[in-house]
Image: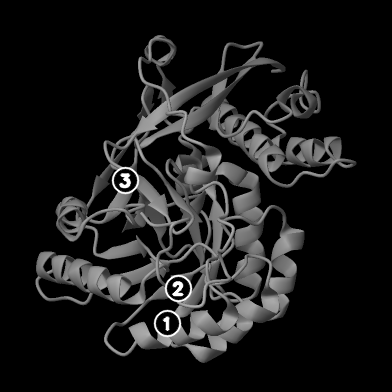
Amino acid sequence: MRISGYRALTTVHEWGRTIGDANGVHADGIVPVPVIMVHTDEGITGVGLGPHAHLDTVFAAIEGEDPRGVTALYDRMLRQTFKAGHAGAVYGTIGALDTALWDIKAQAAGEPLWRLLGGRDRRVPAYASGLDISLTDEQLVSLYQRYARHGLRAAKLKGGLDIERDRRRLTLVREVLTEAGHGSRPGLMLDVNETWTRKQAVRHVCELERTLDLTWIEEPVRRWDAEGLATVGRGIRASVATGENLTGLEQYRPLLAAGAVDIVQTAAVWGVTHFLRVSAVAHAHDLPVSPIGTTPVGLLHSATSVPNHLVSELQDLRPPLGVSLDLTVEDGAFVLGDSAGLGITIDEAAIASLARRPDDAPASATPDVRPEHAGRRLLAVADHDTAP
């Protein structure tokens, strides 16, 4: 079997509401989702969701190769980008191709990827994560009631711009999940997306912890600030979660060495091989791993095979348009199906006929661009740059 080519498509995820975090929002709730389909000369096609940055350059490293040698091909792709570097969107392209190769490998074996990787249990524990910073209290309660009906008993809210608002919203969600769980204590997490300084992070989390039991605080300071993350961790009761924006084991190493992270995260967009390697390194430090992503299907399969998986992020209950997934959400978990490979089906005709596209809002209005004053606010209150 040989890799014969690829196709690059772009669909959208329609949330039906505004979504975002402390850095900004997607006002129309329509987010582009790039797709890469890798073809073989035996008619098997693998699917990966991720960027198309420098796709021709990266694909040259694997063209004509046997896709079943996926881990070696992953390293070939890293070497292909040696001079310019493999961080950022290029790492996402590598991750999308890597995921597609794992899909092919499992399809060729006639097994779902979770079984090929050595997983025993198809159930992957999940927590709710609504990208909800712009929602009113009423909308927030309604959203997490829907998650609760699927059995989810842990939730991660977006915040960091107004501590009293964060407290109120976390309390509302706690009440929703407590009621759904018949009095059992829910898990509560807060993600501030690197918007605080070290001192602010300790002060604000300690303030929240006067009345709330936080499971973790996510990205309280900059992703690479090992000393700062360790300082925050020593000053609060909650765990520190980070890692979704790190690209490569070399970026995790200083954080692990400094004891700066308690929950090791990795984003679905960086691919299966990256997740497996990060999980192994985290396990060597007796730390749990937690996948992040809107459609983290590749990492869900992978999570079944690692000993230190804790819980995976569930954002929307619907997949992107034109994308079908062989999985369900039941009793607080993703339940993976028996389809060979990842269980992803792409409806190219549906994607080609999309009538709605992401709006033309300026880039500065989205969570993808860090606001000018992020990390330099005197108080954790919304300003004109980032108010939802």
| Res 297 → quadrant | top left
Q: Position of residue 138 (x, y in %)?
A: 14, 57
> Measured along the vertical axis of the image, is residue 152 above or below residue 263?
above
Name the residue nearer the viewer: 314 or 387.
Answer: 387
- Residue under label 2: 217
Say whether disc 3 or disc 1 marks the residue closer to the N-terminus: 1
Alpha carbon separation for disc pair 3 and 2: 27 Å
Say whether disc 3 or disc 2 marks the residue closer to the N-terminus: 2
Name the residue nearer the viewer: 146 or 120.
Answer: 146
- Residue under label 1: 205
**Quarter of the N terminus within the rendering:** top right
- Residue under label 3: 335
Q: Amino acid at mark 2?
A: Ile
Q: Position of residue 170 (x, y in %)?
A: 27, 71
SS label for mark 3: strand
* Label 3 Cα neighbours within 10 Å, binned few <14 / some 14-19 / many ≥20: some
Mark 2 vs mark 1: give the one in front. 1
**Quarter of the C terminus within the rendering:** bottom left
Q: Amino acid at mark 1?
A: Val
Res 271 seen here: no
| Res 215 → quadrant | bottom left
Say whether disc 2 or disc 1 marks the residue closer to the N-terminus: 1
